[in-house]
Image (cartoon, rainbow, N blue to C red):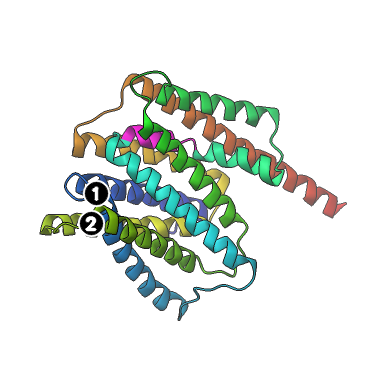
Amino acid sequence: MVLSDNLRGILYMNISMFAFTVNDSFVKLVTQSLPLFQTIALRGALATLALLVIARLTTGGLHLLPPGPDRLRLVIRSLAEVGATVTFLGALVHMPIANLSAIMQSLPLAVTLTAALVFGDKVGWRRMLAILVGFAGVLIIIRPGSEGFDQWAVMGLLSVACVVVRDLVTRGMSKSLPSVSVAIWAGATVFVLGAVGTAVEGWQPVSLREILLILCSATALIGGYMFSVMVMRVGDIGLIAPFRYTSLLWAILFGWLMFSTLPDEWTLVGAVIVVASGVYTLMRERQLRRAALGRANGRAGA
């Protein structure tokens, strides 16, 4: 059976979200016995080496230093990737994976709002209302003033902010820059962060079990990177993007299977509000894009 571009895009998005959640789960598992920065360094080294091999096989060479403005964008993106990794994994070590995933579901809303503020993208009152409702859902998840609100929830929110910077900088990169080169820079800078952190935090012997867990994490991370790139190149992204929220379902499942934790009812209520707001925002953007395209075609045919 031959899949349409949209069906392939939906499949790639689901695989990507599954792979990223598997990576997160194995990192959380291995950091129960291994220091966080040592885990970051080992995982980063494995992922970077694998990406270098992939780049060699798929592009016929390495293009790591792009010319012009892309070079500065690549540096900023890599630093944002480091910030996102430190804050996310720092929170992940201390929070249930489903709770942190629920906070991260606000990312599409945050990207839409920041793009409106920074790039002047038009956001009508319906989408702005959906964004505000979504952020209200985030407040329900973290519950300021309650026992569920602590520095780790704040780190989760900081991770969202770093990913917003990363994604908006990526948006400005030229299409001639290979995606695998961007991924190599991300992996290498995160590895350097882990190595520096390990020099301060210390190094401890690694067991065979921990090596296998880190290998599984790195393999899943590479899969997440590659499928997240592939998904941007097929189908209607407005239709495909809502399937990003399947990561929350995977996080709940792995949190239950691997750590015997489930989110409480308020976290689930907040997550449903955030996801519903995000899906509405994405669908609204798709509807407006189609309307604009229809008007443009009408003028061209006049």
- Name the amino acid, label 2: Ile
Numbered badge on residue 26: 1
Q: Main secondary structure of the magenta part?
A: helix
Q: Which residues are magenta?
A: 98-106
Q: Can you see residue 90?
A: yes
Identify the residue under disc 2: 214
* Secondary-structure class at tag 2: helix
Residue 19, image x, y percentages: 33, 51
Name which residue type carries label 1. Phe
Judging depth in this view, the residue of 200 and 20 nearest the camera is 200
Q: Residue 26 location, x and y as percent? A: 24, 49
Picture quadrant of residue 60: bottom left
User: Could you tell me residue 49's position as x and y percent?
Assistant: 33, 70
Q: Residue drawn 42% across and 28% down?
A: 271
* CA gap, disc 1 and disc 2: 7 Å
242 drawn magenta: no
Give the crowd class for mark 2: few <14, some 14-19, many >=20 residues within 10 Å.
Answer: many
Residue 230: horizontal and vertical position, in percent? 47, 59
SS category of the residue bearing label 1? helix
Query: Is 13 situated left or right of 131 in this image?
Result: left
Determine the residue positioned at 12% across, 55% down. 209
Residue 90 found in image quarter: top left
Q: Determine whether 107 is above or below 35 in the image.
A: above
Query: Which residue reaches farthest right?
Result: 302
